[in-house]
Amino acid sequence: METFATQPRVASEPVACGIDAIPDPRLRDLASYWFSKRAGELPPRRADIDPLQFKPILPNILLLDRVVEAGRVRYRYRLVGTTVVAITGRELTGRFLDEMLPLPYGDYVQRLHDMTLLHRVPVYSLGLYHDEGNFINGLTYRLLMPLRTGGEEPDMVFVCQFWQRRNDPGHWSGDWQKAEPEIALISGP
């Protein structure tokens, strides 16, 4: 199985991988589900996604709307799972991503969302978690998937996000001082 450890760890340019390269089985399953709901090359519509199909990970789910204000693209949290609220230490629903995440981490997350809608495929990322909430010394990994609310253009990002503390067992190991973001465009099953 191909893993991200064997891929170049470059934050500026994503690598292209298949679903099997996603290290977390929950995210692999979610990516498979997303691809099964796709309409040809078009991302699924929001109405095509049934949350009951992935009930165990609902606390880790986020939905964000793409909003254009004065020519600027922003993302507003529409739905935020209970685990996300607990880890960030605050309610995000109704707020904008750029209001809630400190720089430069906020720019990195904005870029992931932009990339997801631009490429119209899921984006996997892994990197150190930077926030002012109650989570320290950890990393986060997430799968971002484009959705459509109407028409052919994706305008919503469906995210599933998990965290791993420094001393917790998980799929990532290495030198936390030298951890670099990993970004991958998921090309399909």
Image: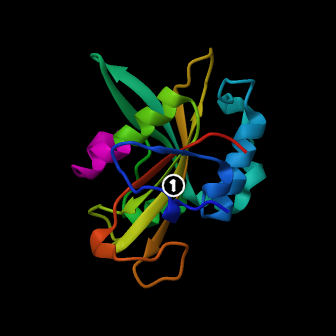
Q: Amino acid at mark 1?
A: Arg
Observer able to see residue 95? no
In the rendered image, residue 29 lying in the magenta stretch gets the answer: no
Observer able to see residue 8? yes
Name the residue beneath numbered marker 1: 142
Vertically, is 7 above or below 172? above
Name which residue lies at 48% across and 82% down.
168
- How far from the left and from the top, in percent, is residue 26? 67, 61
- Taking depth in this image into account, of 99 and 6 the one nearest to the observer is 6
Label 1 sits on a secondary structure element that is strand
Name which residue lies at 78% across and 38% down.
36
- How far from the left and from the top, in percent, is residue 93? 44, 45
Count of numbered marks = 1
- How far from the left and from the top, in percent, is residue 10? 36, 52
Residues rendered magenta in the picture: 96-109
The quadrant of the image that shows the C terminus is: top right
Q: Say left or right for 130 vs 171.
A: left
- State the image quarter where residue 50 is shown: top right
